[in-house]
Image (tube, rainbow, N blue to C red):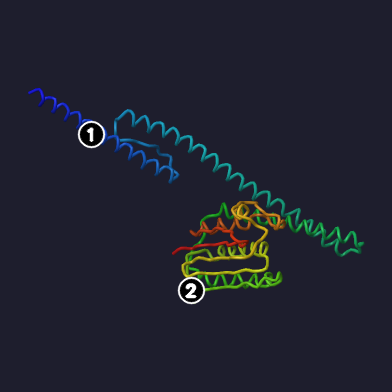
């Protein structure tokens, strides 16, 4: 009789342990699923469990405390980022008026009878004013792009867009001795994109090639929506290429750059659902974009 009772006791203990383990597994599954949802979505809801297990509920309470801290930090970051964008927009807007006045007075001075030295100094001032104007415009455009509503996506032929962008830069490229080699598919490559945004992206990338190229440029569009811009760029290295899309990053070879062209391109491509990146090897820079179906 005793062995049977021991077996029953052991069986009851095993069943109890199995039920307990099963409940804990369900609780952990709920926690994992809840954490995934709350980290992926901007929601104020906290974790809730169906189990009454004290250990699982303690874990959920601790995770909820961390979620509150994370939410507060995210809110501070979003507020700070919004304030920074507004400040950049306001500053760039406020700089436009005095810069316009400076350029106007420079035009008037150019009409005066000046000595060669004074005229040289005037040209230097004009160059600096023009650089400040470009920087101000890029700052304004970047802040507008970052705070703008969603782009208007419509069917766009990437082949036609690449042809138009290359044609627009052809004179500037050949002026630097760069004759682009363009490879396009025989059929249209249609993707959902914003026409104006795509034109700006292509223009910024071609402008980047104009700065860094050592005399060549190859543009390849594939039927799967991938676009490659490749040129020899001995002034770059892997570290610099890894930062090309960072805001305000410039390299010594592009002192006249604002450091916002590729950052704007990256923001616009991602808003259109695409991807963009850069690779460097054997002295050649490749900037690629991909617009999947």
| Place of residue 277 in the rendered image (x, y in percent of width and height, measured from the top left) | 55, 58
What residue does disc 1 label?
19
Callout count: 2
Tell me if mark 1 has few (under 14), some (14-19) or many (20+) residues whose alpha carbon lies within 10 angstroms of its own.
few
| Image position, residue 78 (x, y; %) | 54, 43
Residue 62: image location, x then y, percent: 41, 31
Q: Classify mark 1: helix, strand or loop.
A: helix
- Which residue of the protein is positioned furthest toward the bottom in this rendering? 186
Q: Is residue 149 above or below residue 155?
A: above
Q: Does 207 appear above or below 70?
A: below
Q: Which quadrant of the figure has residue 128?
A: bottom right
Q: Residue at x 32, y 28 (%)?
A: 54
User: Can residue 143 be seen in this snapshot?
Assistant: no
Q: Nearer the viewer, residue 75 or 207?
A: 207
Tell me which numbered mark, 1 or 2, is placed earlier along the sequence. 1
From mark 1 to mark 2, how far is it between C-alphas? Answer: 61 Å
Number of other residues with Cα within 10 Å of mark 2, as a class: few under 14, some 14 to 19, many 20 or more: few
The furthest residue to the front: 282
Residue 149: percent from left, percent from top: 53, 55
Residue pointed to by mark 2: 188
In the shown orientation, is residue 10 left or right of residue 88?
A: left
Tag 2, which secondary structure? Answer: loop
For residue 39, which numbered disc appears in the image? none
Q: Quadrant of the C terminus?
A: bottom left
Residue located at (25% from left, 32% from top): 20
Judge left or right: residue 190 versus residue 165.
left
Residue occupying image coordinates x 53% and y 72% = 159
Q: Residue furthest left?
A: 1
Q: Along the line of sight, which residue is nearer the eye, 222 or 113?
A: 222
């Amino acid at each position: 009789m005793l062995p049977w009772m021991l077996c029953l006791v052991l069986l009851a203990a095993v069943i109890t342990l199995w039920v307990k383990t099963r409940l804990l597994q369900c609780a952990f599954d709920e926690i994992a699923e809840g954490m995934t949802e709350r980290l992926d979505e901007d929601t104020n809801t906290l974790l809730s469990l169906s189990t009454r297990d004290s250990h699982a509920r303690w874990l959920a309470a601790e995770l909820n405390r961390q979620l509150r801290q994370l939410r507060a930090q995210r809110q501070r970051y979003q507020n700070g980022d919004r304030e920074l964008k507004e400040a950049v927009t306001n500053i760039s807007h406020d700089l436009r008026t005095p810069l316009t006045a400076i350029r106007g007075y420079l035009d008037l001075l150019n009409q005066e009878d000046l000595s060669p030295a004074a005229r040289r100094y005037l040209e230097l001032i004009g160059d600096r004013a023009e650089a400040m104007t470009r920087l101000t415009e890029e700052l304004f455009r970047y802040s507008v792009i970052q705070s703008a509503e969603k782009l208007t996506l419509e069917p766009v032929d990437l082949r036609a867009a690449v042809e138009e962008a290359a044609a627009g830069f052809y004179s500037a490229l050949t002026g630097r001795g760069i004759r682009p080699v363009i490879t396009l598919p025989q059929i249209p490559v249609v993707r959902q994109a914003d026409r104006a945004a795509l034109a700006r992206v292509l223009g910024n990338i071609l402008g980047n090639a104009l700065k860094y190229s050592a005399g060549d440029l190859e543009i390849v569009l594939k039927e799967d929506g991938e676009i490659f811009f490749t040129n020899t760029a001995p002034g770059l290295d892997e570290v610099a290429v890894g930062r090309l899309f960072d805001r305000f990053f410039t390299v010594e070879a592009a002192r006249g750059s604002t450091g916002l062209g590729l950052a704007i391109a990256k923001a616009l491509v991602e808003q259109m659902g695409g991807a963009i990146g850069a690779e460097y090897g054997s002295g050649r820079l490749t900037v690629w974009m991909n617009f999947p179906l």
